[in-house]
Amino acid sequence: MRSEKNHNGRWPEKAYKNLAFLNSPDARIVRILCEFLEPGSRFRRNRIHDTIVFFGSARVLPRDEAIRDLERLRAEIASKKRPAQELRDALAQAEVRV
């Protein structure tokens, strides 16, 4: 089946050249596929065969803020007879952040 020319007598723009389409919600899967394929192409071009990937969060609190949170939680727990599990869990997380 052949596409018909548009009202200007031209063939429709190719989808891969249509930036309005490529940036639309309809083309999200195409963008995801590009994000998957492009690094492999770049690795081959640069002759990179082995990689190590680290997963984690780049959202680290500044140290002084982490220490304040830790001290606040310790004081809150010390003021309770039976601190809730949520509070103890929060303390454990705060200790890891410092």
Image: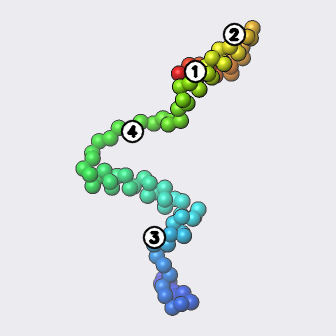
Which callout, 1 or 2, points at the residue further toward the start of the chain? Answer: 1
Q: Extreme bottom residue here? A: 9
Instruction: Please name which of the two marks, 4 or 2, marks the residue nearer to the observer.
Output: 2
Of helix, strand and loop, which one carries label 4?
loop
| Circle 1 residues within 10 Å: few <14, some 14–19, many ≥20 | some
* Image height of 52 relative to 19, above or below: above
Left or right: residue 80 versus residue 23 is: right
Q: Give me the C-alpha separation between circle 1 and circle 2.
A: 16 Å
Residue of label 2? 78
Which callout, 4 or 2, points at the residue further toward the start of the chain? Answer: 4
Location of residue 55 by image quarter: top left
Residue of label 4? 53
Pinpoint residue 88: horizontal percent, then vertical percent: 65, 17
Which callout, 2 or 3, points at the residue further toward the start of the chain? Answer: 3
Residue of label 1? 67
How many numbered callouts? 4
Q: Which mark is residue 16?
A: 3
Q: Give me the C-alpha separation between circle 1 and circle 3.
A: 51 Å
The amino acid type found where label 1 is placed reads Ile
Q: Extreme left residue here? A: 47
Nearer to me, 95 or 26: 95
**Residue at position x 32%, y 54% in the image:** 42
The amino acid type found where label 2 is placed reads Ala
